[in-house]
Image (cartoon, grey):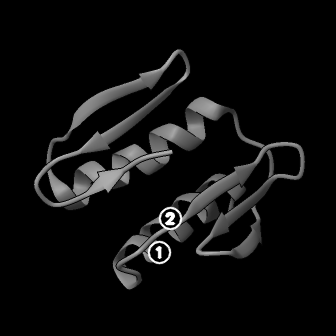
Amino acid sequence: MSNKTDFTKRIRKSFVENESKSIIYHYDDGLLEINWQGYKVGKFSFSEVANAVLGRLKNLNCDYKTIPYSFNSEAYENELFEAAP
């Protein structure tokens, strides 16, 4: 299984199994942390990580709106969820 496949499967599984989610990607270490459990998945760009997480949110919870917080920070929400930094 490729690192990219493993990465997206872990995100998918996390969203299904956990009501409260914390997802942190440590770029320098290639470590994906989901609800404080670390998984070595390899190095991905910020865009790849963001697209995987946001794509899964959209699959599970339909469309969402983007709310800007600052120059490089935004949140995503609809009536079913809120994803914020």
Q: Where does the image place residue 43, in percent across and percent down from the top left?
A: 79, 44
| Circle 2: element type | helix
Quadrant of image for the N terminus: bottom right
Q: Where does the image place residue 57, in percent across and percent down from the top left?
A: 31, 53
Label 2, label 1: how far apart the Cα atoms are: 5 Å
Residue drawn 68% across and 66% down?
33
Q: Where does the image place residue 70, in percent across and percent down from the top left?
A: 49, 21
| Residue extending furthest toward the top | 71
> To which quarter of the image does residue 79 belong?
bottom left
Crowding at mark 1 (Cα within 10 Å: few <14, some 14-19, many 20+) = some
Residue drawn 46% across and 38% down?
51
**Mark 2 sits on what residue?**
11
**Mark 1 sits on what residue?**
14
Residue 78 horizontal side relative to residue 50, left or right? left
Crowding at mark 2 (Cα within 10 Å: few <14, some 14-19, many 20+) = many
Residue drawn 31% across and 41% down?
76
| Residue extending furthest toward the right | 29
| Circle 1: element type | helix
Residue 53 horizontal side relative to residue 35, left or right? left
Q: Are marks 2 and 1 in contact (CB under 8 Å)?
A: yes
The amino acid type, in three-letter code, at marker 1 is Ser
